[in-house]
Amino acid sequence: GVGISSFLRDLRKVVLGHGNFCLRLSRLMVHISLLGALVSAQCFLIYEMRVMVCPNHVHTTRDMYDKFEAWMYDNHTWVTAYDDRRGVDGFWDETRFHSMPKEDQETICALPFAHPNFAFCILLIWTFTVIVDIRRLSFLVKLLIGRVPTVATVYDIFRHDDDERNGRPIREEGKVIVVGLTLGIKAVLLLFVFVPRLAVNTILLWLGCRWLVATDNLEEVFLNAVALEFVLNLKELIYLAVIPMRNKVETQELLIPMNVEERAGYLSYLGAFGWLVLGILWVYLYLYHLQGVLVDYKWDIRAACRLAPHVHWASG
């Protein structure tokens, strides 16, 4: 977005010595620093969630399910690698749920694991939220790294007139046309912009799913989902809050030709629906096979909660 636009415009001016050198260099350094600060802030928030937030929810959920298993299987249990108890098949006694303290009934039935359909939908929504950003990133990588031609010098980045004063880019219908990027610029964008952003998205997807399924209250699931989206979309917040209007206008003026003709076909018409399949597949695999919140989960909470419809959340 605005960072890439400023990087291309100001780097060209600085390298060629055109315009106000100090002004262009200052704006270039501010945008580079802002990009670094943004990635650092996201990494800091991810670390804090990983170390200070998620473990508390995971511990609480594991402790509640440990007690549930011991109660429902009348202490006929075995111990997992995380020192949690799991019921031995054949000793499940559904009648014991009615004698469990009501507070414990309400607590265990408020877990997302007691409502797999609800948990699946929440995780799917969060997954699609991350996929939106991944698709934007994928588009930029294909466009700037793959489709934009490689030029020899920074001077040739924009369409320009050699006889024009200071080699200023030519505006066509108010747009500055990007002709190509140097190999060095492509490498910088890939290593310092696109790769970190993909890493943040990937870690947030995994950590977000873990936090959401470990939340010990259905009401807080929605609040946690909003908090996760806040971290993911922090760049949009920064863009709206602190970026000068002139910089936004210059970003909108930048035009990068696609340099490709896409014919009608199955891939062009239906290819994007592959993200739908990928999202559903990820949620299924995570919820039923990859989640590490309740290792060796027996999917027996829902069956118990259905036996007591009077319990809050049990019939959800």
Image: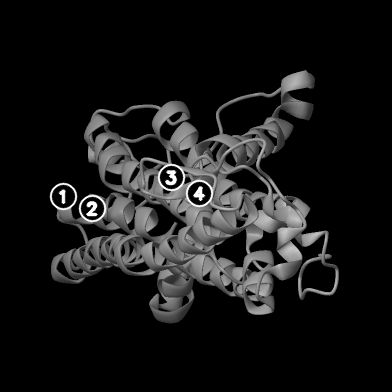
- Residue with the mark numbered 4: 294
Q: Position of residue 273 (x, y in %)?
A: 73, 33
Q: Earlier in the sequence, mark 2 or mark 4?
A: 2
Looking at the rendered structure, the secondary structure element under dot 4 is loop
Amino acid identity at mark 4 = Leu
- Disc 2 to disc 4, C-alpha distance: 51 Å
Q: Residues within 10 Å of mark 3 (few under 14, many from 20)?
A: some
Residue 242 — which label? none
Q: Position of residue 241 (x, y in %)?
A: 44, 80
Label 1 near label 2: C-beta < 8 Å? yes
- Residue with the mark numbered 1: 15
Q: Residue at x 38, y 69 (%)?
A: 53
Q: Position of residue 133 (x, y in %)?
A: 53, 50
Q: Position of residue 85 (x, y in %)?
A: 47, 49
Amino acid identity at mark 2 = Leu
Q: Residues within 10 Å of mark 4 (few under 14, many from 20)?
A: many
Q: Residue at x 38, y 55 (%)?
A: 5
